[in-house]
Amino acid sequence: MPPWGAALALLLAALALLGLLAALLRRPGRRAVGARTLPGAQGQDHEEEVDGAGPADQFSDGREPLPGGCRLICKPSALAQCLLRALRRSTALEPGPRSWLSGPHLQTLCHFVLPVGPGSDLAREYLQLADDGLVALDWVVGPCARGRRVTNAGGLPAVLLVIPNAWGRLTRNVLGLCLLALERGYYPVIFHRRGHHGCPLVSPRLQPFGDPSDLKEAITYIRFRHPAAPLFAVSEGSGSALLLSYLGECGSSSYMTGAACISPVLCCREWFEAGLPWPYERGFLLHQKIALSRYATALEDTVDTGKLFRSRSLREFEETLFCHTKSFPISWDTYWDHNDPLRDVDEAAVPVLCICSADDPVCGPPNHFLPTELFHSNPYFFLLLSRHGGHCGFLRQEPLPAWSHEVILEYFRALTEFFRMEERMKGLSRRRVSFLGGRRRWGTLPKREASPSSNLEEIFSWKRSYTR
């Protein structure tokens, strides 16, 4: 960890501990600006009890309960029934003994503040994009302590694309998910935006909150390297805006089999405008300022860096960086017209599992930050709402991984089995129709999918991909 990273971790811990006592005495009951009140929600926030009614109960009517007090909220479908059966069999949701890690603030702080420790062996690639910007791809190649086993029987190992939070901090849970996925037979790869986690900022342009253009080029490159492997994606926290924007813009052409979001920020504009509890707001804001301070000179021609580093809120920072630019200023409304992650959500054609907690201290109460009508009406979106877990925490006793990791990999396995069964049933139906029609085709081979590399040279010059 670089020296500034250790200092930042200590400062975040100090800020969080100072605010923890105030948060415990007065839980933040903020209502998002412009947020819609969901059916059954009252005008005030009720603190959740372990054995009593709480925010999670507002989502429980007509939904099947799961182990550990979780609820699955979705539109009824064959896929929903398959997922429900898989979650009921899951041991990850079984409630464990209460411990000092059960509090939402501790779950969140352990995830964001503690150092990642001796972690994965990463093979980094720098991918130069069409506008000469750079993004980084970290392929997780080890270690695999208990041996690698392939769970995708009969097929190629799947690629798991992991998108960290929008602040660029690589957390313990992200690396833990990658190591668990590697053990289960996946090829994990972590996507880092321009200027994040050691990726150089070679042009004075950063990636807006919900602009998936860089992610599109990175996925095209991943498809070039693994053209026949299934592709899954997982995003963390505020990084979910990038994944959801990509799925909405690409629709059925996203190349993905399934996706999952851990503690996603779905109502992003309202989230920025309402603000976070002050320890988290100051911590995330400080992290962004430190990360961009090394590029202050390069950004002077496009951004008012003095105003940027004097920002006192995440909204002010975001607005100064992307709206009040010197070359092409735009309004706050226009910015969110182009960056709202749910702007094209009706076009998404990939199953998405969102794992959220009712005691999330960063996003706020679920009846304010979760658009439940999306999960009730869209058959591709599933919400797993737990009573406890904090923001991106979902921790258990060491050395067990976060239970959200286990659930996500079980969800991907259920998706794979469901789609394999669907293809098998379609094949049986086609053969039955052919037999009844008196025609039987021999030696027919499935049409091979065209290689995505046929037109890649028009998009990239692959000599621009640098490996470290």
Image (cartoon, rainbow, N blue to C red):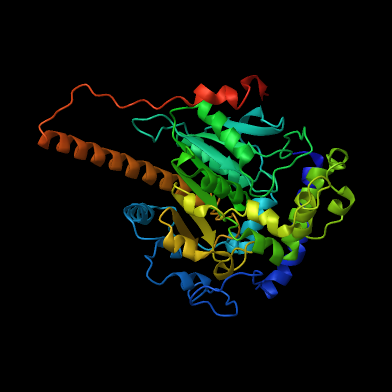
Depth check: give the residue in front, 33 or 467.
Answer: 33
| Corner quadrant of residue 104 | bottom right
Give the percent coordinates (x, y) of residue 441: 18, 26
Residue that sits furthest to the top in the current view: 463
Going 63% across and 22% down the picture, which residue do you hit? 461
**Seen in the image, is 259 located left or right of residue 175?**
left
Task: Reply above or below: 37 against 309.
Answer: below
**Seen in the image, is 269 located left or right of residue 389?**
right
| Corner quadrant of residue 16 | bottom right
Depth check: give the residue in front, 34 or 62.
Answer: 34
Residue 143 appears in the picture as rendered: no
Going 24% across and 24% down the picture, which residue do you hit? 444
Going 49% across and 65% down the picture, which residue do you hit? 372
Task: Reply above or below: 463 against 67.
Answer: above
Task: Reply above or below: 54 against 204.
Answer: below
Give the percent coordinates (x, y) of residue 18: 77, 64
**Seen in the image, is 346 located left or right of residue 43?**
left
Give the percent coordinates (x, y) of residue 141: 56, 29
| Corner quadrant of residue 409 | top left
Quadrant the C terminus occupies: top right
Give the percent coordinates (x, y) of residue 200: 75, 33
Residue 215 appears in the picture as rendered: yes
Image mark count: 0
Quadrant the N terminus occupies: top right
